[in-house]
Amino acid sequence: MRDFLDVSASLTGRRWIGPTDELTRQAELLAQQTRLPLPLCQTLARRGVAPEEAAGFLDPKLKELLPDPLTLKDMGIAASRFLNAVKSRENIAIFADYDVDGGTSAALLISWLRQMGLAATLYIPDRIDEGYGPNEPAMAGLAKDHDLIVCVDCGTLSHDAIAAAKGADVIILDHHLGGETLPDCVAVVNPNRQDETGELAHLCAASVVFLMLVELGRLLRAEDVKSPDLMAMLDLVALATVADVAPLIGVNRALVRQGLKIMARRDRIGLRALADVARMDSAPTSYSLGFLLGPRINAGGRIGAADLGARLLSTEDPHEAQALAERLDALNTERREVENAVREEALLQAEARGFDAPLVWAAGDGWHPGVVGIVASRLKEATNRPAIVIGFDEEGVGKGSGRSVSGVDLGASIQRLAAEGLLVKGGGHKMAAGLTVMRDQLEPAMARLAELLAKQGAGRLGPADLKLDGMLMPGAAKIELITQLEAAGPYGASAPAPRFAFPSCAIHFARRIGESHLKLTFSDGQGPRLDAICFGAFDGPIGPALERHGGARFHLAGRLEINTWGGRQSVQLRLEDAAEAL
């Protein structure tokens, strides 16, 4: 395949890959038959949308895409037991994971129960003291005072902890990869159980919880009992789906799309307060969920009190919401400082081992377990390899987190390591996993993991090419076009936002802003000028090269967005890469 615009090595060392001849033909056919703009048709063609499917794809209907909850095993049992607890006014506890998916899952149940006149007990384990998932002391303690314990976003592999909940029934609503056997409890609803079909494997835990609420609504309607408005809860499902990096395909796409509309109404007190402290001045997008709201909600579980996020998302007190939002914002700032320190050490260590192996990993004493997952993401992005980062405590117990790349199932490999005895425990899903390892097992465990990942092709992965949907001239980048492109969204995991190249552009203005960002204005010399922003430009070669352009012309590549400032809207390119035009 020919390099797009003949860029074989951009300023960041990447090869530019354009659409194939076949995709180009499909896009042109779409444009002819639908009369939609060619840039939009290029995006639709990449998603495999046929001309007759375009209208439905651009306007997805949740009622048409939402699966029947009962297609998931144990769903009928779980819904029935949960409803009996509600009718009998039983004491219900919710045991949730400490990330966004766990917090939103808990908030969904708390909000639903509150509208049914019941208060639930929230329990979220401390990341450092208790670790991920149900533990025996916590479950035994909850069982003493509760009739029903609902584990959300966790529990599928927690056999001993579930068994410790003597005297209470347990329901598990999860999405993490299941083992050969399931815990002994009332129900395990999980699209990633080994005996499931896998058709709904892309659902996050909040979506599984939402499906149970849908089934509860159906049961209550059959009894002519009014149930809570589930559509109003889709903001939480959307937030979890994006923050947990679930693929935005099928029903996930419809859930996020509808959830963003609900969130834009700013009805949920906690999310409104968090959006304000995050300085969100425009309608929410999948980007704002993943990079503004999600990290702040996660900050409580990473370096603060684990339950702060779930409490914020479920509160109905404006004063509490404001206080929690400000606390999470402050913790997120602290988290970034901790992360930066660990990232620098981890990058140096991983680089010394080499970035060409099937697995990139780093481990250190005292590295905060709350940031190792984020640092693993940074390593993965820098190397296009699965990455593991582990922090050891004084007793030699290492808690780590990993992130994978497309086509490499990290969760299954981690689970196999645990079964082989190289890890104390471990699990997760294809793209992310957690593990606990003893210091004396670190080297053999990482060597074995690299071996397993190599068999999946991880060692054959090259540098991350920059894939482009096509070419645009600055004069074509209008707000109307961006609005049309947004109709093919939301964009995120497995559904990347359209990325275009602007060829042979002259740079009229370039200035560093903040510590490492670059603001610039460019044109093709024929039409209007276009603004661009490149975040972190001076952390690499793009910033210095474009700031000192010396009149040279550059190919510029990135994603178009609408910039809102002072009540006015304008088109802006979020610059991701550049190459000198020869």
Image: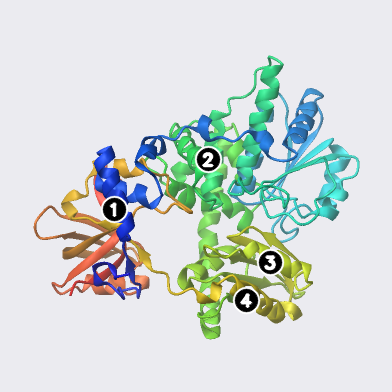
Kind of element beneath mark 2:
helix
Residue 251 shows which numbered tag? 2
Confirm or deny contact between disc 3 and disc 1 (CB under 8 A).
no
Instruction: Residue type at mark 1: give it.
Output: Arg
Q: In this picture, is 41 found above or below 437?
A: above
CA separation, marks 2 and 4? Answer: 34 Å
| Sequence-wise first label, 2 or 1 | 1
Which sits earlier in the primary sequence, circle 2 or circle 3? 2
Mark 2 in CB contact with mark 1 (< 8 angstroms) = no
Q: How far across and how far down the image is residue 322, in percent?
A: 53, 40
Q: Residue furthest right?
A: 167
Residue 36 visible within the image? no
Q: Residue at x 73, y 27 (%)?
A: 118
Q: How is the image coloured?
A: rainbow
Residue 450 is tagged as 4
Kind of residue sitting beneath label 2: Val
Quarter of the figure with the N terminus: bottom left
Would you name the residue on which mark 1 appears? Answer: 25
The amino acid marked with disc number 4 is: Ala
Tag on residue 414? 3
